[in-house]
Image (tube, rainbow, N blue to C red):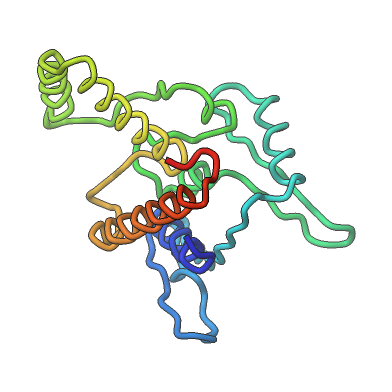
């Protein structure tokens, strides 16, 4: 994935999580990465999305330290400042969504400890009984699956949990993402990585399959 495509993908993700849209800019155009967000409290949030291979050690170290001091479910945050400058606060986006009131009910806050541990938060409310019916149907389906088929289903479920820990619980009714566009981008990435693997195999790189 190119740096530009990676940045665009992160902008789409951030926009979706904040309940807004990515701004499509012309080349060299001056515009924000995502449309401004008006929070439930009335504050208008103007967001820039930056992507790097790694975040600065000062940021990740401070968040990890805060997570170690907190209890399960606490929000890890870091207040950073330069000499003479106004302090800034850094915290996981999933936690900010909960604090700002834009996350789905029951979304995981996600401190460092909570992200590393299995999800144990209460299930989303289901007044219609849909969750109970879905769980019963899933149990019945799993009982008919073979060992390998069940392993595949488990792998998919773990991928869903990984996404939940990073971005909060999926809420299709309120998620503004264009799923066809997201699917197209992912399929294109899969084709690119497949070509990478094929070329690497011809060059005899270790680990290429």
Q: Position of residue 120 (x, y in %)?
A: 41, 21
The vertical placement of 9 against 167, above or below, is: below
Query: Closest to the observer: 191 or 123?
Result: 191
Q: Residue at x 46, y 51 (%)?
A: 202
The vertical placement of 103 against 146, above or below, is: below
Task: Count numbered badges in the picture.
Answer: 0
> Quadrant location of the C terminus?
top left
Instruction: Name the side, left or right, on which 86 lies relative to 204.
Output: right
**Residue 40 visible within the image:** no
**Residue 17 visible within the image:** yes
Instruction: Name the side, left or right, on which 79 lies relative to 163.
Output: right
Instruction: Name the side, left or right, on which 157 lies relative to 120.
Output: left
Query: Closest to the observer: 5 or 61?
Result: 5
Q: Residue at x 70, y 43 (%)?
A: 78
Q: Residue at x 50, y 22 (%)?
A: 117
Q: Position of residue 174 (x, y in %)?
A: 27, 52
């Amino acid at each position: 994935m190119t740096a530009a495509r990676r940045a665009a993908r992160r902008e789409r993700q951030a926009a979706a999580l904040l309940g807004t849209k990515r701004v499509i800019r012309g080349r060299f155009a001056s515009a924000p990465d995502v449309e401004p967000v008006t929070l439930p409290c009335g504050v208008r949030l103007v967001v820039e999305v930056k992507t790097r291979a790694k975040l600065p050690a000062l940021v990740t170290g401070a968040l990890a330290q805060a997570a170690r001091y907190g209890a399960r479910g606490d929000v890890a945050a870091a207040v950073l400042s330069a000499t003479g400058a106004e302090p800034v606060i850094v915290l996981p986006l999933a936690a900010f969504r909960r604090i700002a009131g834009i996350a789905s009910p029951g979304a995981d806050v996600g401190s460092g400890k909570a992200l590393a541990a299995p999800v144990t938060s209460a299930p989303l409310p289901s007044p219609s009984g849909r969750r109970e019916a879905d769980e019963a149907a899933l149990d019945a389906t799993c009982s008919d699956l073979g060992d390998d088929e069940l392993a595949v289903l488990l792998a998919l479920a773990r991928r869903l949990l990984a996404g939940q820990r990073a971005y909060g619980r999926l809420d299709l009714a309120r998620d503004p993402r264009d799923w066809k566009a997201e699917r197209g981008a992912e399929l294109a990435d899969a084709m690119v990585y497949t070509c990478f693997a094929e070329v690497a195999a011809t060059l005899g790189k270790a680990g290429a399959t």
